[in-house]
Amino acid sequence: MPDIVCLGEALVDMVATSRGLSLVQSPEFHKAAGGAPTNVAAGVAILGGSSGLVAQVGKDHFGEFIKQTLWDAGVDLTHFSQNANYATQLAFIALDGGGVPDFAFHVKQSADQMLEPGHLDADYIREAQVFHLGSITMIADPARSASTAALEIALEEGLLISVDPNLRPPLWKSLEDAHEAITSLVKVADFLKVSQEEMTFITGQDDLDGGIRALHAMGPELVAVTRGYEGCAIYNGRDYLEIPAFRVPIVDTTGCGDAFVAATLARVVDSDNDIGDMEAEELSDIFLFANAAAALAATAEGAIPSMPGLEEVQELLELGGIELPVEEEEEQE
């Protein structure tokens, strides 16, 4: 049984091949397997960790593509299913000049959203150490009910609950619904990872120090706020740390946050300490490692194709960064 079980959306990212053009203007796209919890499961496995994915895709060519990608990465797929009645979700992505993605989701009723509570195997979840999920499968039933049921199993068993909201406003009926669902996840999380924009959305605070403390007060033992080229900030109720990013040539930032989560969970599982008992020195080491993984994920296109292996992360940690062209150095300053 895997140490880390992820539940959530599995889809295909259709990434525009021309940088700096909108989705309307982009003439060509290439496909890459994706979906935030799917990316995390793959990222953990590629780092050499033990992960499994509870998800559903269509019984179609895109679903087969995702399945093969995850198999190649080493993810346990005993609870990954295909449904012939619904199509695999496609997310079309255009990248701006800095590699920041703009998303458009193509399938209105996709297979990942039709995951049902009956698809769950309680023992599969109970035997893990970590249960990770996001908010996309909390949007509507039946996936919402399946996610809630799985979360209840994990909470009852005392697993470490990892949450990354991965806010995608176009998918929600309203931002009020999104806020309510995401807040419910934050309250039961042990480890919470958010972007700075998501921090503001949840707490209403723009100030980093105030926002991260407000998130911690909602329930998580450990909160990480990712900040792009500025690295990340973490807070556990005692220690507030800002961990610097690694400078690398940026190609595509899709999946960087997922690489960050995967690296964090892989290191947490290997630790002898509970997440709430970790001292500042250990936390600094873990999140420097996570920042290195996230940085490497930005150096290639796609999410899963860009997930780094352990040796790559260790090499970047030793190097401290990758030399940039002059114009890119200026852009990141």
Image: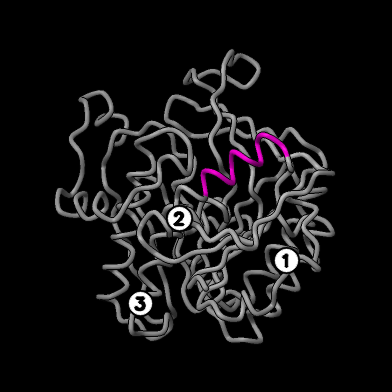
| Mark 3–mark 2 distance (CA, rounded to whole Å) | 35 Å
Mark nearer the N terminus (2 vs 1): 2
Q: Which residue is mark 3?
A: 239
Secondary structure of the residue carrying numbered label 1? helix
Q: Please say whether residue 138 is one of the residues in the magenta stretch.
A: no
Secondary structure of the residue carrying numbered label 3? loop
Secondary structure of the residue carrying numbered label 2? loop
Residue in view at x 56 percent, y 22 percent: 29
Determine whether label 3 and label 2 are within 8 Å by CB.
no
Identified by mark 1, the residue type is Ser
Q: Which of labels 3 and 1 is toward the front?
A: 1
Determine whether label 3 and label 1 are within 8 Å by CB.
no
Report x, y in % for residue 54: 64, 61
Q: Which residue is mark 1?
A: 147
Identified by mark 3, the residue type is Asp
Residue in view at x 48 percent, y 73 percent: 3
